[in-house]
Image: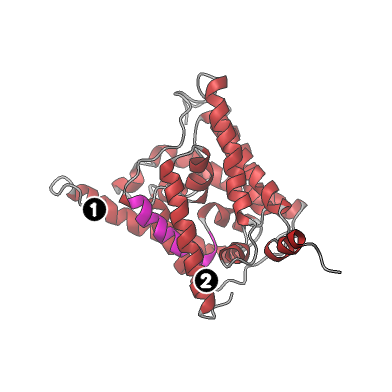
Amino acid sequence: MTDRHPLFVPTIVVGGLIFGFGLGYSHMARPEVVLDFLQFDDLGLPFVMFGGAAVTGLVYFVAPRLLDGPPLARGAFERRLKSFDRNVVVGGAIFGAGWGLSGICPGAAYASLGVGNVTILWALAGMFAGAYVQGVWRSRAATGDAAVANAD
Amino acid sequence: MVDPLPLQLLAEYFPNGIARYAIGGLFVGLGASLIYFGTGISAGASSFLESTLSYVSDRSRFQQYAASRDWRWVFTLSIVAGAAIYSLTLGDAFAYETDVQVWRLFVGGGLVGVGTRVGKGCTSGHGVCGVGSASRTSLVGVATFLLVAIGVAQVVAALGVSP
């Protein structure tokens, strides 16, 4: 924290404010609206996710061509590339099942709290519980990996 | 008088129009872009779950996020505040309360907590930043969670669970 640029945290704040405002404005903070999309009653949701992706896609493309690296941190601009393995599909399917059941995802849950929907604390409690269970399980698996390779 | 076909389809499948979603998505993308442009960070929302658990658990899965847990709190609280600003200005001033049943939120939230962390991302990490990076891993992740979510939501609705 101490060796960070003085504008690092303010940038996270302003970015988060805009991000949360967008989730509120798009009504993604309302599980009903997400469920309406998943049931094909209102097909607006892709405009939020892929509209957002179009903007970030442009900036991810342009930023490394304008600057040598991010002005507020060390290192270079990198695209968000994660390695592909079975976990991406298994985890994606589990996430999809939860999203389809509840109509809420993590960022939208934080925003939902912001628009005054206190009931969403149930979903947040579930998310922390789920993240905890998989973390304990996978930490144990990682420790066992010393003996059994690919136990994960 | 009957509307021309395109308008009928628009009214049927977009009962709330498109602007709300497209403009909201623009803001979401701008917020993530500002953070990326300033810091090089791809802002995903679900890592906050594990980074916050690093305060209370020494497990390696959580401790790997310890270095980022302070600014992830800042990011999450700013999302809450940004949505609150929307609610106070253009929204309904905190009047909204979801009708979706509590068990659906809790059980579904639990699966979201497991799946986003195992699957390496959520709707913001994979959906906005990963797709924006043209990452094939993220495209597969998004296709997987979208298709499964549609299937589950349709089955739950068909079983008569509402809302």
Q: According to the image, what is the colour scheme of the structure?
A: secondary structure
- The residue shown at (63%, 63%) is A33
In the figure, B161 relative to B65: above or below?
below
Q: Amino acid at mark 2?
A: Gln
The quarter of the picture where the N terminus of chain B appears is bottom right
Q: Amino acid at mark 1?
A: Arg
User: In terms of image quadrants, where is residue B160?
Assistant: bottom right
Question: Which of the numbered marks, if any, corresponds to residue B154?
Answer: 2
Name the dominant secondary structure of the magenta segment: helix
Q: Position of residue A18 (x, y in %)?
A: 65, 42
Q: Is residue A30 left or right of residue B87?
A: left
* Label 1: element kind: helix
Q: Is residue A124 left or right of residue B99?
A: left
Q: Nearer the viewer, residue B96 or B74?
A: B96
Q: Nearer the viewer, residue B42 or A89?
A: A89
Task: Give the magenta range.
Answer: A87-104
Question: Which of the numbered marks, if any, corresponds to residue A140?
Answer: 1
What is the crowding at mark 2: few (fewer than 14 residues within 10 Å), some, or many (at least 20)? some
Q: Position of residue B6 (x, y in %)?
A: 74, 59
What is the crowding at mark 1: few (fewer than 14 residues within 10 Å), some, or many (at least 20)? some
Total count of labels: 2
